[in-house]
Image (spheres, rainbow, N blue to C red):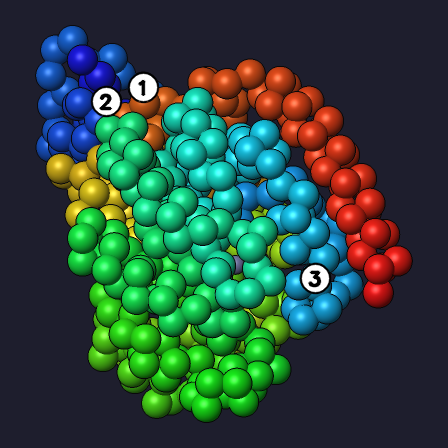
Amino acid sequence: MNRFAIRNAALFTVDPHNRVIANGILIVEDGRIRALGEASDITVPDGYPIIDAEGHALLPGLIDCHSHTSLMRGVTENMQLMDWLPYYQLEHRALTEEYAYHSARLCYLEALKSGTTCVMDMYRFMHRCADAAGEIGLRVNLAPYVADAPGKDFFATRAENRALIHSHHGSQNGRIQVWMGLEHLFYCTADAYAEALQCQRDYGVGIHTHACEQREEDQAVEEHFGRRSIAQLDHYGILGERTLLAHCVWLNDEEIKRLADAGTAIAHCPISNAKLASGVARVPEMLAAGLTVGLGTDGPVCNNSLSLFEEMKFSSLIQKATRLDATVLPAEQMLRMATINGARALGLERDIGSLEVGKRADLLLLDLKTPNMTPAEITPQGGNVLWNLVFAAGSQNVASVWVDGRQLIADGHATQVNEAEVLSQAQAQGLRLFQQCRDIAHLRTRML
Ligand SMILES: [Zn+2]
């Protein structure tokens, strides 16, 4: 039986009261949190191995609400979104199952080593992504990149998405969830939205898609469909509580209200939005309207990092800088966005996203005895450590990570896979894929 106790850690629970326990104990049994509280209030039953976490903070694992696994890091730079799209499509013209598998192993390893325990991944050949998640132990929501509009036949098909639900939804002890993935309004036909809705009814799965990423894109949508993006998605009937929209940078007040009324969640990807010069999403207005906003990295192609620590910090700073207001998006809010709000966006808030009795033991232990976290003062409100978790901490502080109570990172290193082997395979496969993309680009340029 999988059971153990962690003691002497500062617990940042992110529960409904944002409880912080300076000297806490947390007990895990059968993959779930059995008890937690002040060291003086909790007795560890006999026979439970005890981990002494003095000088560490224990948090719920971080949740990446929008990512695209990839090997194409740092090769499509200095481009606006619309210029960048044809390059990113080269990857998908060249992609094979083998590339998808090695991409997923690499990205899931990076996520885990950065303290992320759950990733919403939109990609292709996702049965192979499930294999990679199984090897590494990560919790993943898989949303295939479905596109069925003419000329987009190199993406995933609706049939593939449906088949993946049958083969993998709820597999690996529930760690694998499969959603309907729809690339974008320009990539998918009306039938694709109808089928996504049907699958939602048939299997209870969520729907994930991109929306309102860039101003020019939104204008093009309006010219083509006669409606702005949110109105068009509403017209297709997919706005609802089990729908997650990535980006939503260019929402007006009416659209924010419409999404809030529908209970639709947003995956906010501030670093990707900045890198591709898309703009700054109106997060304070979204939160004020009651929208669920989680954080997404958007993957290595347009980020180029998978660290939610970077995402938390940047998300807060870009709002402060552009609004000339130092009070917006404080640390407590950012930590909630990276954990419980993300869980809610993925429909998993009953199981993950906070340290609460009965939830799955997806845990992140951070070393505070490092230059970037010293001095550390922990108060019931969190003290300076709360602020430094968001504005100073990073992957270098990740000491241990558990998913379902299984320790996947120990002393900063993966326990389930040989990291050097994952990297050497990704290196070889990545360089091969770069060359293939160059060859395709060359061919296409000559054809023009
Ligand atoms: Zn994306």
Marks 3/2 in contact by CB < 8 Å: the verdict is no
Marks 2/1 in contact by CB < 8 Å: the verdict is yes
Up the image or down, 201 lies above or below 101; here it is: below
| Helix, strand or loop for disc 2 | strand
The CA span between labels 3 and 2 is 51 Å
Up the image or down, 44 lies above or below 288; here it is: above
Q: Which mark is residue 86?
A: 3
Looking at the image, can residue 423 be seen? yes
Where is residue 238 drawn, in percent x and y? 29, 70
- Circle 2 Cα neighbour tier, 10 Å, few/some/many (<14 / 14–19 / ≥20): many
- Circle 3 Cα neighbour tier, 10 Å, few/some/many (<14 / 14–19 / ≥20): few
Where is residue 323 drawn, in percent x and y? 53, 82
Location of mark 2 (residue)? 5
- Circle 1 Cα neighbour tier, 10 Å, few/some/many (<14 / 14–19 / ≥20): some
Question: Which amino acid does the dot numbered 1 rest on?
Answer: Ile
Question: Which amino acid does the dot numbered 2 rest on?
Answer: Ala
